[in-house]
Amino acid sequence: MGVNGIGYTIAGIYTMPEHLGVHFDGREIYVTNVLARERAVYVEPPAEEALAEELNVRQLIVVHGPKGEGKSVLTRVVLARRILRDRAVVVEAGADVAKLKQVIDEIRRAGREPVLYFDPSQPGHYPQRPWERERYMPTALDGLRALTAIRMAVYDKNVAAVAVLSYDQHRIATEEGILGGHAEVVTMGDDFFLQSLADSYSGRRGCSDAVYEMAESWFENHVDNGATVAALAGDWLKRQGCRHEAAAAEAFRRAADKALDFALDYIWHAVLGGNRRAANAYAPLLVLKGLYGSISMELMEKVAAILGTSLDETGDSMAARWLAMRHGGTLEEAVKVAAKQVLERKRFEPEELYNAMLRGAAELRKRNIFDMFNNQRR
């Protein structure tokens, strides 16, 4: 997409709110993303005012919080407002700092002000099919290194930038020393926000209260993905109708299952980078994490040595850091479910992740590592 003579892109250059999946219609704001094939009324999260205020300063702003709580939609709406108000140009930034600076200069020569944007886990928008058949393909954790280029551009070109990170991504970027100085906006859904999402995505079909109560229970137990589950369940009700209370329960069940599917997609694409070499090194450790909980970096190295591999072979310390973390919520549950299904030979998607963990479990059994862990727990 060119902008006044700019004939190349970074990852994307957006000059209209619609490019961000945001639609202004009178006093209403609608969003279109993987959670709503039709326009859904935008529900303002509690953190919108804070992000809008921070954007008035040319600095790096990091929006972070639990997965599935509306960080991406929030950021896109705030940026869309900036396009309308200030004729800003949103630049979805990559890791090439020289090209990034060149784009900034050309946008300013065209009389407009750029805002840099980075969201490695953003969902796709404008889907062509129901979310039941959608897959989630976030950027690999290694892509967080693009933040170094963005930070340099912010400092050298005095430009505003927004990075959207989940808690695990934020922790890794901090531990790796990638972020440097920055402002923070922390997002967290509240009860009113969840109920409003269920209303919006269901088209107010009458089942939203029941869906909201189930989503609230999910949020209390998982500490993440409350917004995702509320929105998906609402969308299902909008398509299927709300005939009786059982419809709300079915909508919630489908939405909760999909949230776990998205978590498995995240593990394959973001943590393992969709890379078979990385999967072969880390899949046995994923199985152990699912069965026995978090394992230390030291213990991971010990297991890798027994298996005759090295975590250094992949050149990806971020995946090892991720495995050593305590995640809780949907990610932790997804790892547990995957490990159990691998042992029971119950297939799941992504197929590549299932096959890698199946091979990993076979290696663990062959080297008697399961026995070692079981004996330690006695």
Image (cartoon, helix red, strand yellow):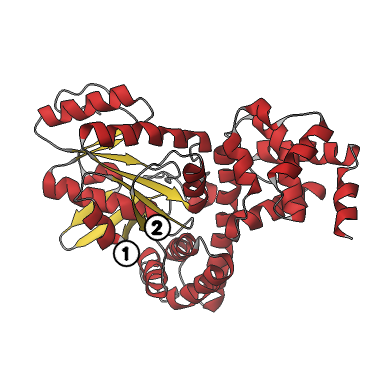
| Residue under the image location 12 percent in, 46 percent down | 86
Q: Secondary structure at mark 1?
A: loop
Quick check: 303 above or below 240?
above
Q: Amino acid at mark 1?
A: Val
**Position in image of residue 150 (x %, y %):** 33, 35
Kind of residue sitting beneath label 2: Gly
On the image, numbered disc 2 is attached to which residue? 70
Task: Please name whichever residue, 239 or 8, is drawn nearer the observer in this view of the structure.
Answer: 8
Residue 335, horizontal then vertical, whole percent: 67, 51
Identify which residue is drawn at 33% across, 26% down: 97
Image quadrant containing the N terminus: top left
Q: Is residue 90 left or right of residue 198?
A: left
Whether residue 3 is visible to the viewer of this picture, yes or no, is no
> Residue 345 or 273: which is nearer the viewer?
273
Q: List x then y, in percent, for residue 286.
A: 71, 45
Instruction: Kindly indicate whether the residue at mark 1 contacts the one at mark 2 (C-beta within 8 angstroms).
Output: yes
- Left or right for 198, reference 113: right
Of pointers 2 and 1, the one earlier in the residue sequence: 1
Quadrant showing the C terminus: bottom right
Near mark 1 (Cα within 10 A), the count class, few <14, some 14-19 or many ≥20, is many
* Image: 198 above or below 135: below
Give the residue pinned by disc 1. Answer: 43
Tag 2: Cα neighbours inside 10 Å, few (<14), some, or many (≥20)? Answer: many
